[in-house]
Image (cartoon, rainbow, N blue to C red):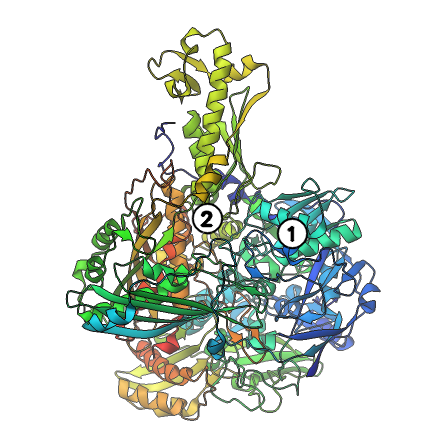
Amino acid sequence: MTLQTDYIGKPTSRVDGPAKVTGTAKYAAEYNVPNLLYGYVVSSPIAKGKITKIDAAPVLALPGVQQVFSHENVPHYALLDRSYKDQIAPGGSPFRPLHDAEIKYSLQPVALVVADTFELARYAASILHIEYEEAAHETELSQHIDEAYEPGRGKAGYQPPKSRGNFGKGWKEGVAHMEAQYSHHAQHHNPMEMFATTVEWLGDKNLNIYDKTQGAFNSQLLVTKVFGLSKDQARVISKYTGGGFGSGLRPQYQLLLAVMASLQLERSVRVSLTREQMFSFGHRAETLQHVALATAADGSLTGINHFAVAETSQFEDFTENVVGWSGMLYNCKNVELGYRLAKGDIYTPLDMRAPGAASGSIALEIAMDEMAYAAGLDPLEFRLRNYSDIDQAQDLPYSSKALRKCYHEGAAKFGWEQRTPEPGSMRDGNLLVGWGMGGGVWDASKMPATVKASLDADGHLTVSSGTNEIGTGTYTIMTQIAAESMGLPIEAVTFVLGDTTLPQSPIQGGSWTAASVGNSVVEACTKLGEALLKQAQKMDHPAFKDAKIDDVQFANGQMRLRADDTQAVVLRDVVQASGEPKIDAENSTVLAKLEMLKPPRYSMHAHNAVFVEVKVDPELMTVHVTRVVNAVAAGRIINPKTARSQVLGSVVWGLGMALMEESVMDHRFGRYMNHSLAEYHVPVNADIHDIDVVFVSEEDDKVNPLGIKGLGEVGLLGVAAAVANAIYHATGKRVRDMPITIDKLL
Amino acid sequence: MNSFTFTQAAAVAGAVQDKAAHEGSAYIGGGTNLVDLMKENVARPTHLIGLKKLGLDTIETLPDGGLRLGALASNADTAWHPEVEKRYPLLNQAILAGASPQLRNMATDGGNLMQRTRCYYFYDLATPCNKREPGSGCSAIGGYNRVCGILGTSDSCIATHPSDMCVALAALDTTVRVSGPNGERTIKFEDFHRLPGDHPERDNTLEPGELITGLDLPEKGFAKNFSYLKLRDRTSYAFALVSVAAALELDGNTIKDARLALGGVAHKPWRDKEAEAMLIGQPATADTFRRVAAKVLANAKGYGENTFKIELAKRAIVRALKQATEMKQEVDTNAFLNSNP
Amino acid sequence: MSQVTQAPPPVALAPTQPVSLTINGQAHTLQIAPWTTLLDALREYLDLTGTKKGCDHGQCGACTVLVDGKRINSCLSLAVMQEGSEIQTIEGLGSEDQLSPLQQAFIDHDAFQCGYCTPGQICSAQGLINEGKARTEAEVRELMSGNVCRCGAYSNILSAVMEVVGRELKIEN
């Protein structure tokens, strides 16, 4: 199908905007079904040990308290680990809430108090007497590097990093060298909407489950396996998700607790987590990294060494690609990469926006800056001299790679050529000015997704798929693509998502939704076009008699002959003539699934280059990021308006990573101590100044038919490193431990 | 959150009686700190006495030229009050440096004094804390004490008082007016908050059942030369790592009178009168300011994670005094004295 | 091995009581526990779920509503403390058919992504306009800093609010 450009590529306001700005968009905890009970989770104060006593009697005596659930009375619904594995569970043995007396991590759920009102459940939870026997715990990653091990391929999609050439030889060949350690602490996603599930009991174990998730089908899969329910019994609905960033890729424990309580009490139940409990599940794994680089006299890299140790839980091997990117972003023959895990008494880490790459790019991109200085080169020039035209890690050509344009257009927009290299050499009045840069690479993936397209007798097109809207603009861009495909005005198209009764879609993550669901929307619309053509051919319309789908086009609510666009039928009339209320079509995922089994012919990736200006007070060492230019090459941009917003958000995330975000663990208690939004600092409006987003043109007919690469993660890459590099340029202080708080600069 | 009963008090006397009649009761003004502490189960009152209908929310000039802030005036109304903006801009700045616009609309002036520490361990029932549970131990010592104090600490507590407003009130020699079972009395601001000593569970010197009814500012407001400098982990909506209220009276370049108070460093707003005396009669120069800063921090003690505050506080004092002298804000810690950086 | 216990003593459960609230011009009387927050009263008892719970501790601003025209965090106010006040929520500012100028500006400037902090941002911006203190971009940024947006839509929030406060935006984009 040839695409016009009536909608695709045009800045389009969000179709879900009116619902979101008026408060009518409903999130998981907002379905006020009748006779609802409220569950309140009690969390463990200790990091390791066991529960020795739960005295529920005084709580149960309170009028209105329905039940106190704990390991003492929750049935073991499923016996095998595999029943508890969701779609992206890493290797190991998934945590089962309220399963036994063992405490595996601090803030572990230990009981669920269910009562008639939220107020009563919360009060009752506060007086529940629980005794524990504490055991010695270990949570400090730096104390366990010696025990770190190489993980297997536990998680779907994880590839151990591949070394090539001989780094030792490359190191010796180099005339300039750098070697340093980098680190960052754990970070928590902290989406604004706290995790919650409302389970509507419809009788006979039939449930409507309103869940906060990035994958309704993933939640359904887990619930059906754990509780032995059929898919019909466990309908999961998730129309809006108040921020994900990876936190909703795995179903969280409030889902299992809410469903359990509903099945046990045969009532509708809501379980909402508190902000403190938002620190009780996955997080970006703390990493300790080591990078060594060497360059020849001409500035070309002769060796890259990147090694990372990351934390994981005692029960699962969480893996992410931290160091692999260092084997592909720059041209180099000798690359040595290593990635190990060390276990601690913590909950399993979880993918968090640009998982692995965000962590790894901090080390690599600061190291590249250090290397540029050691080699006496401008950091941008240094990167251009080491530009990689093919993916050396996979030994494949790129389907497209416009990173060079990102460097040039970003630098031009930023005014990089005005930079003087000497640290401390640029000033704005009394303030030190620093300019730094970084960048990165992220996978352009596509997963099989099913979409249904349905045209009714009023000429309204409804397109549906069980994907999610987490703020990425899914409702809007799918509406645009469908409107484009069927030649209909946006107002005549509705995209429906977030329901397991809809065609199956992958979880909303990995920056793959636009490509996966978007291309499937085109396929479904093509099928619908074929069905409409077939129906038109039954009508008294000789011009279409022998037409094939490629002979027609869709525009202005009509199907027209390409050869003679005066020959047209109104789509509405075609549906009406069929005698049916609507004409449906669904795409097939057979080819997409086969495609995934074939070895790739191209390396498919999005790239970015980011330029940052900081101003630093030379005595107080306060840092303000005054200007950012983020140039992104991500294939076709469906909606520049929402796409720009996604990259703006990535920059804000990068500034947070660089300057303030860390979950502080007190290892004596094995507990994150700043478990609130007052003390886990994320940027506020006053922290944000000029951010400029540049989408460089990048046409790619190989990555997927629409040429989409995805935008959820790529904009974050290199941002934190660029801030660190800018701070170095301003102050001469090289900070390698994120976040760069004021104490590290004094 | 605890179960409690609620009554809305109609008059101060009634509120005080209600308090005496209910063991485990508490006054509630704006609720911004108390409701939070109740949700964390740190505070578990069984009876709340609402103060909103007491009036006491006016701001009026006193016969002696001072200004009386009603205890129930909101922080926002206080900051933006024309007399405060004109005569006590240091107070305006300090209030606007704290919390968020929403919280400042809710929070009362009396409640601001009653804020409890933001020490992580005080807020988390899973960890020992002498302030929350006397005798249980101080987890901040040897723990994550970045937000904790460096001046006037004790072996049982290193918590800080979190207020910005109180730092300015301390610098301005405010008098606290209270009403209680034994009638009315006034407390000098510097005597209102306590150092932790062996009793960190006591934040202040209020007697049981006493209620703050107002804050009296003396006439002298240092409106010509002042600075409130707040340093924190993000530009807004964060508690101070270190804050400095500096106010000067200058004769040419000579300091005739001075006030200096710090926030974020001690169990109470840290006013240093000896340092102020050192400033008087001296030229308003960086040298003078550095000597004074060194004096203020001479007995400071770092606890590891917060040791940086000693150096940061010194630099902040020098800068705040410089800004007060020149009346030019150099750091954008407050948008209302600054344009874009 | 140490024993750790958690056990504050239970107290007699206080009875529920009638609480009268005026919300978006409409009078409501609820029979609720005194320790019900205004936020929970709106969301759980009145089905006014446009007001969001983002932290429940006054640390994010998602629960912002207007009380007598002033913005507050509804999570830190008890419902019983708001008897006699005029409460305005996002539902009272405009509807999908009749968007308020701020609601329209938020759409036009794409000043949100997931939408969860959005009602609070808009109520807060309305409060900012009512206050009339913010004139410059820096001031709007500062006075919108009580509303956390984890999607990071701050630049667009700024431009949306600036448009409505009638200032020409100086930043390009």
Against B281, is A382 above or below?
Answer: above
Q: Which mark is residue A197?
A: 1
In the image, what residue occupies the spot 40% across and 58% down?
A652
Q: Considering depth in this image, is A595 or A639 the residue closer to the camera? A: A595
Quarter of the picture holding the N terminus of chain A = top left
On whether disc 1 and disc 2 are found on a single subunit, the reply is no
- Judge from the rendering whether residue A76 lies leftward or rightward of residue A471; answer left or right: right
SS of the residue under disc 1: strand
Q: How many badges with numbers are in the image? A: 2
Alpha carbons under labels 1 and 2: distance apart: 23 Å
Picture quadrant of residue A392: bottom left
Q: Which residue is mark 2?
A: C112
Which subunit holds the residue at mark 1? Answer: A
In the image, what residue occupies the spot 46% across and 46% down?
A472
Q: Nearer the viewer, mark 1 or mark 2?
A: 1
Q: Are marks 1 and 2 in contact (CB under 8 Å)?
A: no
SS of the residue under disc 2: loop
Q: How many C-alpha atoms fall within 10 Å of the one at disc 2: few (<14), some, or many (≥20)?
A: many
Q: Amino acid at mark 2?
A: Phe
- Judge from the rendering whether residue A301 lies leftward or rightward of residue A714; answer left or right: left
Residue B296 x %, y %? 40, 89
Residue A720 x %, y %? 36, 63
